[in-house]
Image (spheres, helix red, strand yellow):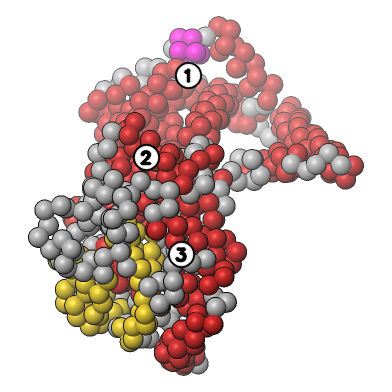
Amino acid sequence: MSLESPEAVVAVAALEKPTSRGEARLRAARNRRLLVHTVRVLLLAAVLGAWEALSRAGTIDPFNFSMPSKIWDQLVQWTMHGTAQGSLGEQIWVTLYEALIGWAVGVGAGVVAGIVLGRIRLLAEVLGPYIKVLNALPRIVLAPIFLIWFGLGPASKIASAVVLVFFPVFFNAFQGVREVDRNLIANARILGANNRQVTLQVVVPAATSWIFTSLHVSFGFALIGAIVGEYIGADKGIGLLVSSSQGNFNSAGVYAAMVILAVVALLAEALLTFAEKRLFRWKPASGGDR
Amino acid sequence: MNSGTPRGNPHEGTAPAIELRGASKAFRTPSGTLHTAVRDLDLTVERGEFVAVVGPTGCGKSTTLTLVSGLEEPTEGEVLVGGEPVCGIRQDVGFVFQQDAVFPWRTVLSNVMAGPRFRGVPKAEARERARVWLDRVGLGAFTDRYPHQLSGGQRKRVALAQTFVNDPTILLMDEPFSALDVQTRALMSDELLELWGGAGTDRPDDAPPASVVFVTHDLEEAIALADKVVVMTAGPATVKQVFPVPLPRPRKVESVRLEPEFIDIYREIWSSLGEEVRITRERGASRVA
């Protein structure tokens, strides 16, 4: 996402007065943007082309590595004729549904726990070591246990998404609460705020930017949780698509599922960025947005 | 509007506004040692008096204010406000901080409404009072802005309105203008004197203005504003000397400092303060060496 600098350059240039120098700078920025986009597209074409060519020539094993045209065919086939488990849309929806629910629950629990522990020192000191231990556990190994507990349905996937999402969100919320400017809290208390008002009207808004940074990462984790859960055992979903393609030695299917996942993750990311921009209107714009 | 003072207080009219008796405050540093910020502090502020506290940088002047405000408790000694020992944060205290302490996620109007809203004033009334104060500090046209869209001086004005809207009878100011440029600072000082003197406010004429403790390291600012200048020693701070400032009011900061009387007072206080500044400087130098 950090590769978006050309847009920022344009935004800065747009602030210039429409003098001839400003126009020249604007044109230079536009040319630069064009260059970046062109090279980007060329790079993608080169990589895909090389992959296709090498695979067709037999330099790399097409059985293991498949090739872009086959992956495309697989995507088309899934879209037009559905997968073995039902329509492609349904698979995407099931995975997305599990990830979203898991994400929402994990975020809610993480934020609340982070704020509570951040505000109540005693609780943080008592629970601190346990949280560290739980965090040290590679939580993905919990997925099989959840499968045993909650069965093949969405519940087990939601559970693994929750445990993956909870910790990063919790730690960020906790840190955010701890890092709130002491002056702001002192000011609020002098102005007459009680503890509850300090928490809800000062600490929480001040910590939101910390919390939001973790939301970006954690949606990715929620998807991982859902996919791994499905991969281990499910009756629907993209993870199942991966595992059944693998079972049929259909490498094109595995890659196609990966492409679908990437698109879903990027769309979710874009939605989050949009929401963030709406929520943080009070923040000074970075990169000359204003 | 002078609702902050408890009418039934038996000390009303007799006890000084603020009294520190042998107050000391020690903090535990992260390394575990005790750091004494102020020791054995005796200070009296009468009702309606403007007291400036000057001292070398980092000597513990700000700690005095946190003790009076109730944000911190003294380790030893007593802090009385209106004749009563300070216990927690009082409703009639206002505090203007050195750094920006306005809430960046609230608009200007909402920032000024914060105090009354925290204290349970209905929204419409809080908005009305906030608008009045924003007009008084000259920000009537900026109510919808966010703090980051304002200049440093404008943000300070928001902070002043935010404080004054609560009608404090005790006003504590911790180097409030130190982050501003020189011209803005003089302007803000004049505006502060006007607001404090009650120009354009609805305070009745017979009610005394708020009692002010104004901490600064700028002696000129201190003399121009105050009725009384308190010189603190190098840290751990205690009161070294108290100088009255008999300059007539109303004052204009830019012109009052050119008067011969002002210069005499300045010279007199500096002979006391300069020594403490030198001590602090030498300590700093020996620490660097």
The tag on residue B250 is: 3
Measured in 3D between alpha carbons, the distance from the residue under mark 1 to the one under mark 2, in whole angstroms, is 54 Å
Magenta span: A86-91
Q: Earlier in the sequence, mark 2 or mark 3?
A: 2
The local secondary structure at tag 3 comes to loop
**Circle 2 sits on which residue?**
B129
Q: Is residue A77 left or right of residue B63?
A: right
Tags 1 and 2 both on a single chain: no
- Give the residue type that dot 2 points to: Arg
Labels 1 and 3 in the same subunit: no
**Residue A254 visible in rendering:** no
Q: Check disc 3 and give the amino acid type.
A: Pro
Magenta-highlighted stretch: main secondary structure? helix
* Nearer to us: label 1 or label 3: 3
Q: Residue at x 18, y 63 (%)?
A: B13
Q: Nearer the viewer, residue A157 or B52?
A: B52
In which quadrant is the N terminus of chain B drawn?
top left
Q: Is residue B276 above or below residue B71?
A: below
User: Which of labels 1 and 2 is toward the front?
Assistant: 2
Provide the chain ID for the residue under circle 2. Answer: B
Q: Which residue is mark 1?
A: A92
Asked which quadrant contains residue B213, the reply is: bottom left
* Disc 1 secondary structure class: helix
